[in-house]
């Protein structure tokens, strides 16, 4: 059982998230208008953010240009350094690899992620994408934790910067819990300890 009382505080409420997603969508459309864009969503955490982002991009395009001006090709990838709660790996493993049917060569790629902290997993993914000779690669992350960065990651689009706290909600989870909450909040330490002990 999960509860709003498991959170120590709300960092970003639903309206704040919606407004920021809209701003990001408009910026991305302006940067890629009249072109093609591969949107690569990092599952599972980035799914909700990516879905809302793409919807906002299309809505903005229709309102602003009376047409869908960005030719969006959506695809997914899933990788993790923690394939189960009790294992933490030095290098990520691909749980859902890059789709071999997606042509990356010569196309701009936007990687959509829920959070970038140390950057090890994102660096690994960016290197795999670069092997496919894209035109360009940019990262759009909902949350950025630069204080935890151990490798250089070029974040082109950032929703919010967060301090080093344990967050959940709006796609982010702990042991698959709290993804469905409409806000992003800091979990209480006792809740984290209980969940990670399972």
Image (cartoon, grey):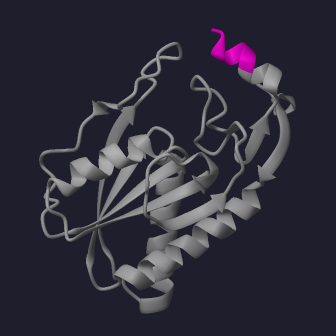
Residue at x 56% of width, y 64% of height? 158
Q: Where the N terminus falls, by quadrant?
A: top right
Q: Is residue 124 above or below residue 56?
A: above
Residue at the outermost top position: 198
Q: Left or right of 76: which side holds 99?
A: left
Q: Where does the image place residue 72, in percent across and percent down from the top left? A: 30, 67
Residue at x 67% of width, y 41% of height? 169
The one of 48 and 105 positioned closer to us in this rendering: 105
Q: Left or right of 191: which side holds 139?
A: left
Q: Is residue 11 magenta?
A: no
Q: Where does the image place residue 118, in percent across and percent down from the top left? A: 51, 43
Q: Where the C terminus falls, by quadrant?
A: top right
Q: Where does the image place residue 6, in percent across and percent down from the top left? A: 82, 28
Q: Is residue 107 above or below residue 122?
A: below
The image shows a total of numbered marks equal to 0
Q: Is residue 195 magenta?
A: yes
């Amino acid at each position: 059982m999960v509860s709003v009382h498991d959170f120590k505080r709300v960092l970003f409420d639903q309206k704040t998230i919606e407004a920021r997603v809209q701003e990001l969508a408009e910026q991305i459309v302006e940067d890629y208008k009249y072109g093609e864009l591969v949107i690569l969503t990092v599952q599972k955490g980035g799914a909700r953010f990516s879905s809302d982002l793409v919807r906002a991009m299309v809505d903005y395009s229709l309102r602003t240009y009376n047409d869908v001006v960005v030719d969006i090709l959506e695809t997914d990838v899933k990788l993790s350094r923690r394939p189960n709660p009790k294992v933490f790996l030095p290098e990520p493993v691909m749980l859902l690899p890059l789709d071999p049917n997606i042509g990356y060569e010569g196309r701009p790629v936007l990687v959509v992620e829920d959070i970038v902290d140390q950057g090890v997993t994102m660096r690994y993914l960016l290197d795999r994408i670069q092997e496919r000779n894209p035109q360009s690669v940019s990262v759009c992350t909902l949350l950025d934790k630069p204080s935890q960065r151990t490798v250089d990651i070029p974040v082109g689009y950032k929703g919010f910067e967060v301090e080093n706290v344990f967050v959940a909600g709006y796609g982010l989870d702990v042991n698959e819990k709290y993804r469905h909450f409409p806000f992003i909040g800091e979990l209480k330490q006792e809740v984290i300890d209980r969940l990670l002990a399972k």
